[in-house]
Image (cartoon, rainbow, N blue to C red):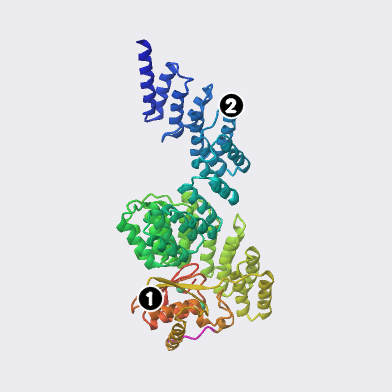
Amino acid sequence: MASISLANSRASQLNNLDSCSSMAELKQRHACIVKLGLSSDNDAMGRVIKFCSLSKSADLDYALKVFDTLPRPDAFIYNTIFRGYLQEHMYRRCIVLYAKMLDSFVTPNKFSFPPVIRACCVDLAVKEGKQVHAQVIKFGFGQDSFCQNNLIHMYVNFDSLEEGRRVFDNLEKKDDVSWTTLISGYSSQGFVGEALGIFESLPVKNSAAWNAVIAAFVQNNRFHEAISLFNRMRNENVSIDKFVAASMLSACTGLGALKQGEWIHDYINSSGIEVDAKLATTIIDMYCKCGCVDKALELFNGLSCKGISSWNCMIGGLAMHGKGKAAIDLFKKMEAATARPDYITFVNVLTACAHSGLVEEGRYYFSYMTEAYGIVPGIEHYGCFVDLLGRAGLLVEARKVIDDMPVRADAGVLGALLGACRIHGNIDMAEEIGKQVIELDPNNSGRYVLLANLYAKAGRWEEVANIRKLMNDRGVKKVAGFSIVELEGSVNEFIAGGRTHPQATEIYAKVEEMLGCIKDLGYVPDSDGLVYDVSEEEMENPLHYHSEKLAIAFSLLKSKHGETIRITKNLRVCKDCHRASKLISKAFDREIIVRDRNRFHHFKGGLCSCNDYW
Ligand code: ZN
Ligand code: ZN
């Protein structure tokens, strides 16, 4: 009788341990079972350790204290602590404990390896990781997909794609995770072709695999291919989940393909895909970057729960569109909603000030971020601040900010000042800054062109030739300028002077007509530009065949009257195209929205939202 009641009481005590709701309660029950003489019992203590390591109210130190009292902890207990360490990001200690486990002759089981491999992976412990791999095989888990998938991921993270591939190839029963891990691995290192090859060899392609390969193209900025894969996926009737939807929204954002983005958004709404904070932010970002800042704002205002990234995204969106005052108002609302701004928030607030010429506000927020929130300005904040002061013509002050920076100015910060020198024609400062920028960013053609431009304006042709020579000697390639316009469900790409579009003849005729119309409004092709101010767009191409002019002509041909024209361009808009776009918006009574490398230009009635500072 006595032994039965003891057994009952032991069982109920153990069950009690599993149902604890707080550390205080656990400590009490722990004391009870110690009194029952169970302080060396692995089953009982394993439950205590599990609660302390992994529950919501985890207290890993307590778990470790209990662990240290155990004479012979078993594999289950070791595994629990491994996971506890991972949860606390204590990767090195996880690896050390694993070594101790082996030293104590405790045999690891299949649940021991995944956390240890993950620890090696994150800690970039290459040597230890390889040893663990050998032990996985030694202990007989060479075909355990859970262990093997973790190994694939580890090798990918070590940049050892070949090793990862070998593990994958040796695995007889590959599951979804094996395939997607390898696809993402190749993609993360830019080998999109290989990622696609692996995907194609997958016998049954489910949505996880589709998502991995679509995400691979999106991450590598190959948006067109991502969209065609997506269309293939739809044709094969694979269901679209929130991950695919998010990847596709990013592809549309990259291309500025509003119609397709709207389609995805409608699809999300109608198919009942759960819109979490992250997806909501992706949708808002898509509308911002496809030029529909009002729609973005409407969605943002409708969010029941606004996370920091939603606030940042919306403030940044308003900034890009030159709506500086609105961005600052939103920032104030954010503070009022007791959402704590972070580093990125202030980058966006300062960008807003810079794009709208709000000098006083910019000065204020530049010091406010430290005073109110203790955020020390980083290189991005300095970049925005210098940009702001420079654009406003305060070149000397901007220069002083750079000189007083606690960190060394990078090409971004100096480039902002160089850009300001261009706007305000300060050749002396430009020369000095330009040389530094070129040395800091020697492969960026835009830096050379900008300086050459300034020399050209000053008539210093010898220096212009020197810069060209320097570019040639260093083999610096100019980035080809292109503009994208989405019409009738397809994405059309134009390059300067390109004639590959099926309707090229019509388009070029329209360009001539367009330019004829705006000449009546006083358009004179920029003569400076004809010589040099063509920014990075192919210098050999006459100004009137720059990619955005072709894209505008095409849109005028193909879209209905009154429809807004939306163009995405990879480079900065040149001076001549900017002036022409303003006049075209007036002559043809069309709103034209151009997203260039840095910001949005809303051309309407002969004016631009950037007030000619860009
Ligand atoms: Zn141009
Ligand atoms: Zn503009």
Is residue 524 within the magenta segment?
A: yes
Q: Which secondary structure dominates the residues rendered in magenta?
A: loop
Location of residue 66 with respect to 152 vertically, above or below: above
Q: Residue 20 carries which label?
A: none
The percent position of residue 225, horizontal first and vertical second, equals 47, 64
The quarter of the picture where residue 325 lies is bottom left
Q: Mark 2 points at which residue?
A: 104
Q: In front: 43, or 143? A: 143
Identity of the amino acid at label 2?
Ser
Neighbours of disc 2 within 10 Å: few (<14), some (14-19), many (20+) = few
* Residue 591 - label: 1
Task: Read off the magenta span.
Answer: 521-526
User: Percent x, y for residue 340?
Assistant: 42, 49
Which residue occupies 57% across, 68% down? 395
- Whole-percent x and y of residue 2? 36, 10
Label 2 sits on a secondary structure element that is loop
Helix, strand or loop at label 1? It is loop
The answer to whether residue 335 is above or below residue 399 is above
Residue type at the position of mark 1: Glu
> Where, by quadrant of the figure, is residue 105 drawn?
top right
Residue furthest to the left in view is 270
Can you give x and y, in whole percent of width and height, for residue 519 in the image? 45, 88
Other-residue count near label 1 (Cα within 10 Å), few / some / many at <14 / 14–19 / ≥20: many
